[in-house]
Image (cartoon, rainbow, N blue to C red):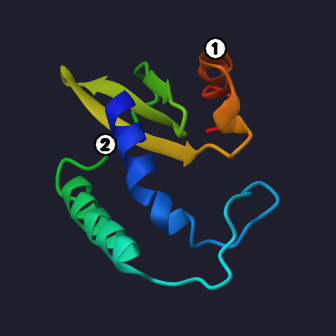
Amino acid sequence: MEYSSRILSKITRPLNDLLPPTHTKKGPKRSQKEWRDTEEETFNKLKVILHFVSTPPILAYPNFDLPFELHTDASGKGLGAVLYQKQDDTKHVIAYASRSLSQSESKFSAYKLKHKRFQTI
């Protein structure tokens, strides 16, 4: 999980930077939003990733009579989580969650990020 959330956050950064600033997203402001080679490469990488994650096995339906297992991770770039459940002696993914950190959150200590990952995904 640690590897995938870090990589996905890093891959999507050029596309996230195209978004207009919001009250939670502060960052470099471009005078013009331009789709350049970097954004095109990012978009093509995401298409490959989406194809990979959208081919079976995708997600399993949860069985609320069985226990769940939550794996979380935090890095200097983002937070991520995967919810698993063991069904028929096989661990299945029930849900994924991730988000990039804001500029101020990226300055948090590893200890604070470790606890934040449980609060805001």
Task: Evaluate whether residue 1 shows in this view.
Answer: no
Indicate the quadrant where residue 60 lies.
top left
**Which quarter of the rendering shows the C terminus?**
top right
Q: Position of residue 33 (x, y in %)?
A: 58, 83
Label ID, residue 76: none
Position of residue 97 in the picture relative to residue 31 (left or right) = left
Residue positioned 62% across, 43% down in the render:
101
Pointer 2 local density, CA inside 10 Å: few below 14, some 14–19, many at least 20: some
Position of residue 79 in the picture relative to residue 23 (left or right) = left
In primary-sequence order, the first of circles 2 and 1 is: 2
Q: Position of residue 84 (x, y in %)?
A: 37, 29
Secondary structure category for the residue under label 2: loop
Residue positioned 62% across, 25% down in the render:
118
The residue carrying mark 1 is: 111
Position of residue 109 in the picture relative to residue 11 (left or right) = right
Q: Position of residue 56 (x, y in %)?
A: 17, 52
Label ID, residue 60: 2
